[in-house]
Image (cartoon, rainbow, N blue to C red):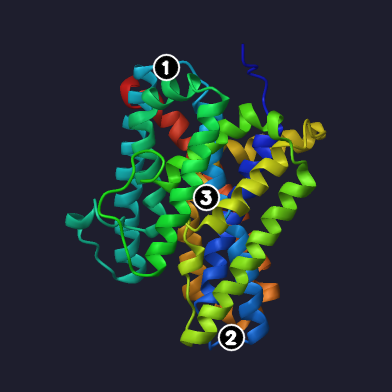
Amino acid sequence: MVSRERNYNIELLRVISCILVVCIHVSNVYSRAYGEVSYGTYLFSLFTNCFSRVAVPVFFMISGYLLLEENVSIRKSIHRVIHTLLVLVFWSVLYYIWNIIFWDDRYDFATLFEEPVKKHLWFLYAILGMYIALPFFQLLFKKMNRRLTEYFVMLWIFFLTLYYVLALADMEFTYTVPMVGNSSYLGYFVMGYIIRYFSKDYRLGSKICFGIAFAAGMINIGLTWWETWVSGSHEEIFFQYRNPLIAICSLGVFGGIIEQGVIRFTEAQKALMQKISRHSFTIYLSHIIFLDIVKEEMEPLDVPGWIGIPLYTLGIFLVTFAFAVAADNAWKHLRQYLPKAIV
């Protein structure tokens, strides 16, 4: 029987990822201003941008860590799908209105299945597909023994690397290998579950995991700097989540925290982590509103990156956290009046 006791290593990973997601988008403001900001500011933005990219893969791994061990339930999966669809529609409409009011930009809803209203909403599209197929994944991966699991990991890493390298050479596969080759996000999702149940057989230790993550991140920063210097403009091709270096960095961070064992936190720290974790989804969805305000009203590039990136990241995170608490509490009261099937 799997223990249902709250895992504060996972709570810590969720809190860190919440903050790093904000940092990605703040760092983007500085990185994409290459040529307008100082060289030091640009390099600092590359550092924060690259290492913050672990946030989204870690979110997928947390989901896999928690969900793939559950008993198969079509009813629960349908509920997750319906709920996620409603969240997608709600935030798409909200950002559609926001873009008109704040940016005077009208989105064409005919492209809804091609491009989200706001780019960060792509996460909902990806996780929605996993929720639809979740019962099959739950049954399949519970039946996998150690040898099959090793085979899955080997193939996923191989095809992740192959497809990415070929994409760099402007070569794309028309037909991809199902499961192990057609989605980096599914791979992250499954790796969360695999690390949960098989990491004890391959213990590297937290220091080695973090060291591997740091090395992969620094190589990625070097590649990005080189590509930018050669092209004369900021390049983000190495910041894609299908980049095997991003995968290694993310797996290193996730594995490093998990291999810490039971981390001792004070009751106050636990309560704060639970609070942030409870509202993490809304923080992810809503923080772009406050980022837009900062970009338009506060001239962030006037502040050196080593000050501005942590300052704006923290400020946007705190404001978004307060907003998320208020919004989620309002939804908690509203849902009492809605049909149970959609809440």
Q: Position of residue 268 (x, y in %)?
A: 78, 35
Q: Position of residue 78 (x, y in %)?
A: 32, 24
Residue located at (50% from left, 28% from top): 148
Find disc 2 in the rendering and name its residue. 37
Residue ID at (67%, 48%): 253
Tell me the residue at 36%/58% (across/down). 118
What is the three-letter code of the residue carrying label 2?
A: Val
Q: Is residue 63 visible?
A: no
Q: Nearer the viewer, residue 55 or 188?
A: 188
**Residue 265 in which image quadrant:** top right
Q: Secondary structure at mark 1?
A: loop
The residues bearing labels 1 and 3 have C-alpha atoms spaced at a distance of 25 Å
Looking at the image, is mark 1 or mark 2 earlier in the sequence? 2
Give how far apart the Cα atoms at labels 3 and 2 are: 27 Å
The image shows residue 264 at horizontal and vertical percentages of 82, 33
- Badge number at residue 72: 1
Q: Which mark is residue 56?
A: 3
Q: Earlier in the sequence, mark 3 or mark 2?
A: 2
301 displayed left or right of 236: right
Q: What amino acid does circle 3 point to?
A: Val
Identify which residue is drawn at 57% across, 32% down.
194
